[in-house]
Amino acid sequence: MKSIRWVPIVKVRFLGHLRTRLNIDELNIPVEGEISLTDLLTKISNLKPELQQIIKSIVEYTSEYLLLINDVDINVYGDLNKVKIRDGDTVVFVPVVHGGKE
């Protein structure tokens, strides 16, 4: 009998126009144990190079996108290098829509 190996993953979801732009709803990123958010963002950048500028702006706090980890805005955590991601976590890229009257 062949055994099935369970692979720990982080689910990365894309909302709004990112879903259309990337032509994907979500990615499942394999993780070993616990990784830093910055390491996860590097993995995402490598898989989807079209996200590199967006990820750079998120890390530099100049973004027009929210990044949520398990439904919590990453800005709540402070230092992004200290944020840890582990199996079962969900990371969501949310475009922030601005508008109004001129």
Image (cartoon, rainbow, N blue to C red):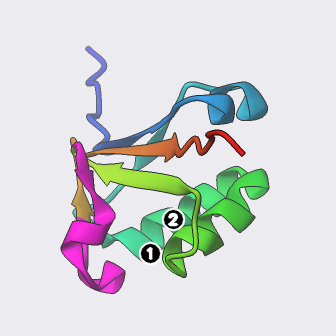
Disc ID at residue 41: 2
* Viewer-closest of 1 and 30: 30
The one nearer the camera, 40 or 50, is 50
4 w.r.t. 5: above or below: above
Q: Residue furthest top?
A: 1
Q: Is residue 96 above or below residue 33?
A: above
Is the Cβ of the residue at disc 2 closer than 8 Å to that at disc 1? yes
Residue 80 covered by magenta stretch:
yes
Q: CA–CA distance between discs 2 and 1?
A: 5 Å
Specify start and end residues of the magenta stretch as a single range: 71-84
Q: Where does the N terminus fall, quadrant-wise? A: top left
Q: Is residue 73 above or below residue 55?
A: above
**Where residue 69 sits: x, y (%)?**
28, 52
Reading the image, the residue beneath label 1 is 38
User: Is residue 5 rendered magenta in the image?
Assistant: no
Of residue 2 and residue 47, the one placed in the foreground of this image is 47
Q: Amino acid at mark 2?
A: Leu
